[in-house]
Image (cartoon, grey):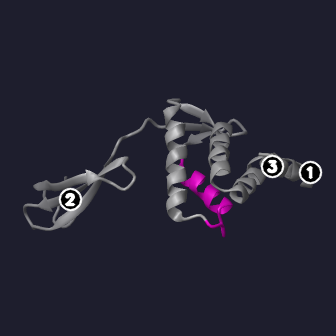
Amino acid sequence: MKCPFCSSDNTRVIDSRPADDNNSIRRRRLCDACQKRFTTYEKVETIPLIVIKKDNNREQYDRAKIEAGILRACHKRPISVKEIDKLIDEIETEIFNLEEKEIPSTVIGEIVMDKLKDLEAVAYVRFASVYREFKDVNTFMDELKKILDK
């Protein structure tokens, strides 16, 4: 590992521990040349995942898109950033546990909706209204009735 300060190749690990999400390792390193310390994160490399969109176009999986959709759904709701991060991690874990190289966006959308339903009803309805493309008030009301009947 090259030192980000002096570009020396002589660095060593002085401390390793799991990062906050338990899916990566945080390493404190020391440069033998300039004696400065820096932190690196090591994460398991996953297979590239391709998402098949509704129009049959394909694009690479992007966690930021799921995050943006969930943040919009949770806007001004009593949900902490920590809860949102945990939710996104759970969704991502479920997606990658399918062990598919290509996954339809509809599958991802259903996973997100299942997780949001358990987290917060209003956020779920907000996400569902965009994802399911509610055409009128009646389809919106039908979705609300499903939640209220449980």
Q: Is residue 32 left or right of residue 103?
A: left
User: Measured along the vertical axis of the image, is residue 90 above or below residue 4?
Assistant: above
Residue at 35%, 41% (x, y): give it: 44
Q: Are marks 3 and 2 in contact (CB under 8 Å)?
A: no
**In the depicted view, which residue is nearer to us: 98 or 105?**
98
Q: Is residue 69 magenta?
A: yes
> What residue span does the magenta drawing correspond to?
62-78
Mark 1, other Cα within 10 Å: few <14 / some 14–19 / many ≥20: few
- Closer to the N terminus: mark 1 or mark 2? 2
Of residue 20 and residue 32, the one placed in the foreground of this image is 20
Look at mark 1 in the image and give the residue it sits on. Answer: 138
Residue pointed to by mark 3: 133
Amino acid type assigned to the residue bearing label 1 in the image = Asn
Question: What residue do we see at 69% from left, 58% from top?
Answer: 123
Tell me which amino acid carries mark 2.
Answer: Arg
Question: Are there few (<14), some (14-19), or many (20+) residues within 10 Å of tag 3?
Answer: few
Q: Nearer the viewer, residue 51 or 84?
A: 84
Instruction: Assign the C terminus to one quadrant of the image.
Output: top right
Q: Compared with residue 40, is residue 99 higher up or lower down, i.e. above or below?
A: above
Figure quadrant of residue 3: bottom left
Task: Please provide percent x and percent y for residue 63.
Answer: 53, 50
Residue 28 has which mark?
A: 2
**Could you tell whether 57 is left or right of 29 in the image?**
right
- Please name the residue shown 19% across and 67% down the image: 5
Q: Is residue 77 magenta?
A: yes
- First along the sequence among labels 3 and 2: 2
Spot the residue most to the left: 33
